Image: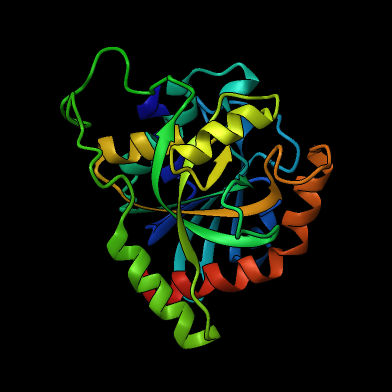
Amino acid sequence: MIEETVEVLKSKIGNVDVAIVLGSGLGRLANEVKDAVHIRYSEIPGFLRSTAPGHTGEMVYGLINKKRVLLMNGRFHMYEGYSPKDVAYPVEVMKMIGVKKLMVTNAAGGIKLSFVPGQLVFIKDVINFAFRNPLIGPNDEKIGPRFPDMSQPLSLEWIEKANNAIYENMKQKLEIGTYALMLGPSYETPAEIMMLRKLGVDMVGMSTVPEIIKANHVGLEIMGISCVTNMAAGVLKQPLSEKEVLDVANSVSSNFVSIVKIIIEKTC
């Protein structure tokens, strides 16, 4: 199947400087792509249907600031009923079509008490509280090692370069934090958030970690950015809702787009 997937994509796109997975409410970046080629997931063999709100379900290829980008406008989640291997499949495909740099983005709940809704945070490390791994099963050594190293799951060097570029252009830097994956689709309880905070977690969400694991497996340089769309359960005395997540992500999408365009231009 992966050979068929790769063949179809290579027939539609060229070389890629950076691939980006766009999280909930962050799809506005796709509107910035010049000479865009749109490929619906339904046209790509092996790709699944993205059912999460705010996920368009297409790949977009073209130019941003003269760099060749490949966007996943919508991702797959385990809470949709997909396996970790299914969720991470696009990352393996990216490796096979020649991608070397991958940026993953998401909407996340803020656990660190100093965070505010709308804040963008670089991911420096992850905790897999879904307890599911996309690498379980037979391993092909031609794709990646049986036991990939996860001592630096995200590129701290790329983060440093990106933060320096952001500061040069916008006189600000993004904070850096640890992201935890919970299986979902229910939001976390206050007790779970208290536990995560005690373990040093700064953001929590229902995606991204399988993609990071697979990126390490296949040898991609990877960066992660969380948009804190809400404060996690128990931080504020208000219920959590999908609408709040999307509203906040949409409200900061302009700043998100500006920052990611700087990262693309200056570090890719």
As displayed, is residue 213 above or below residue 20?
above
Q: Which of 239 and 75 is in front in this view?
A: 239
Q: Which of 189 and 175 is in front in this view?
A: 189
As displayed, is residue 247 above or below residue 143?
below
Q: In which quarter of the image is residue 95?
A: top left
Q: Residue furthest top?
A: 137
Q: Quadrant of the N terminus?
A: top left
Residue at the spot x=58%, y=38% of the render? 205
Q: From the viewer's perspective, is 215 left or right of 142? A: right
Image coordinates for residue 116, horizontal then vertical, percent: 67, 60
Image coordinates for residue 175, horizontal then vertical, percent: 48, 64
Image coordinates for residue 187, horizontal then vertical, percent: 69, 30
As displayed, is residue 194 above or below residue 79?
below
Residue at the spot x=77%, y=48% of the render? 246
Image coordinates for residue 41, horizontal then vertical, percent: 60, 35
Whether residue 166 is visible: yes
Q: In which quarter of the image is the C terminus?
A: bottom left
